[in-house]
Image (tube, grey):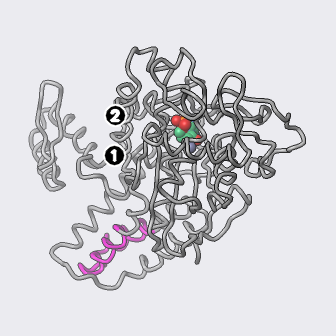
Amino acid sequence: MPFRIYNTMSRSKEELLPIDGEHVRMYTCGPTVYNYAHIGNFRAYIFEDLLRRYIKFCGFKVTQVQNLTDVDDKTIRSSIEQGLPLKEYTKTYIDAFFADLAKLNIEPAEYYPAATDYIPEMIAIIETLFEKGYAYQSEDGSVYYSIDKFTEYGKLARLDRKGMRPGARVEQDEYDKDNAADFALWKAYVLEDGDVVWDSPWGRGRPGWHIECSAMSMKLLGESFDIHTGGVDNIFPHHEDEIAQSEAATGKPYSKYWMHCGYLVVDGKKMSKSLGNFHTLREVLDMGYTGREVRYELLSGHYRQSLNFAFKSLDANRTALKRLDEFSTNIKEAVGSETEADDLPEWAAKTRSKFAEAMDDDMNISGAMAAIFDTVHAGNKAMSKTLLSGGQAVAISNLWKELDAVLGILEAPAEEASVEVTELLEARAIARAEKNWPESDRIRDRLAGLGWTVKDTPEGPKLRRL
Ligand code: AMP
Ligand code: ZN
């Protein structure tokens, strides 16, 4: 079965056929590094991670670019408020972003370009847009893109061109569909920009937000590439404007497929900085949840549907992850000293095809997880009757590794304790409080069997890898 993905451009599912037949080049709009990313942002990055992992599972090569927006209205405003140079200010959040990606087991992209390193490329595109008649300079020195000149303007967001007001301009990077207007390619210097300024053929200033992604994507992936992704809020104006700039400049199609994820919502409202209804990943981790639990949550709904965030579903995930951990432990025990894989037992033989069939359908994650849990259920039953040979267990272990290369949640990361381990730790604390030393010793041995030791510190018991 081919991998079919929903293309926002055609509003339909299409087979993923990379332009060169074998290598998928994808661009994902990255964080604006003016603050810590919130878990709504990470919903988008986890959707993109699942996508890149599944593309690889399908046998294609992937080159993914995720940009860092380190210069725009928000980063400049915040760095000036903090009295820090822009680069120094954004570095804190760039470092935090990479640490958060690791916590969520998000595979690194091949490139993480920062906008401030691509100013000459942005200027070159704007020069071409001038030559071709799509750009003009306004009285205040800023350069704008004339949406009227690009007859296909509005094709991604499906805008009604009749309602547009020719010549109207919008200065801010973010605006809504009702205010579709000529947007800024280059913003003339104003005092509020502090020392954030570059020379250009149109005078001193800085780039608009949209041109940044056109420059970084085309420089690193070529003028035409395969997939461009983001959250649905990126469709307009950001992606519409990227298409207008890029296709007008090159005369070639920009991205072949456009994929957008739905929002992470809280009580029906998009999680966002502006509404104040957000949680950063570090806040959630400080509350005692693990990166794996958060990943499971953000992965668990279909990427195009909105996903409601509530702590009680994070709690509920512990049960599901515990079942996965118990299954993995049982399989490891069944492997014993066997190294050669045998054929998969009957109850596992269809798992891979069921998983792939669901994922091929625009990443139907519920179907894919159902294939996983059906196997866990059948496997536990078979193992309780000791019906599994060492060789079959090796085969299952290999299958699990292959599927976890896509999901990234089947195995607890080496440095992160599984649910079973944290529960044993709690049981040990109870046994010790009750002075039940034999029970406490039994739990210590069980933990050692799972690769952990406990150190009692003034802050309470701490787990360490053996
Ligand atoms: P920003 O830093 O605001 O440019 O957002 C970075 C990425 O996060 C973009 O792809 C947004 O579409 C995405 N995003 C922001 N808020 C949410 C949310 N609540 N749910 C899902 N994706 C989001
Ligand atoms: Zn972008």
Q: With respect to residue 181, does 228 lie above or below?
A: below
Closer-to-camera residue (293/421): 293
| Residue labelled 2 has its Cβ within 8 Å of some atom of ligand 1 | no
Mark with earlier residue (2, 1): 1
Mark 2: give few (<14), some (14-19) or many (20+) Cα within 10 Å.
few
Query: Is residue 264 something that shows in the picture?
Result: no
Secondary element type, mark 1: helix
Residue that mark 1 sits on: 102
Q: Residue at image x 45%, y 16%? A: 80
Q: Residue at image x 25%, y 38%? A: 426
Q: Quadrant of residue 10?
A: bottom right
Would residue 217 be found to the left or right of residue 141 on screen? left
Residue at the farthest bottom position: 343
Which quarter of the rendered image does ligand 1 occupy? Answer: top right
Q: Residue at image x 48%, y 47%? A: 45
Q: Quadrant of residue 331?
A: bottom left
Distance from label 2 to label 1 (Cα)?
17 Å
Task: Tell me the chief SS of the magenta region.
Answer: helix
Mark 1: give few (<14), some (14-19) or many (20+) Cα within 10 Å.
few
Query: Where is residue 418 drawn, in percent x and y?
Result: 29, 49
**Residue 414 on the magenta segment:** no
**Residue 397 on the magenta segment:** yes
Circle number at residue 459: none
Query: Where is residue 43 drawn, in percent x and y?
Result: 51, 44
Closer-to-camera residue (280/368): 280
**Looking at numbered disc 1 in the image, what kind of residue is underneath it?**
Ala
In the image, the segment drawn in magenta is 375-401
Q: Nearer the viewer, mark 2 or mark 1?
A: 1
Q: With respect to residue 206, does 122 lie above or below?
A: below
Residue that mark 2 sits on: 288
Query: Is residue 416 something that shows in the picture?
Result: yes
Query: Where is residue 193 drawn, in percent x and y?
Result: 52, 20
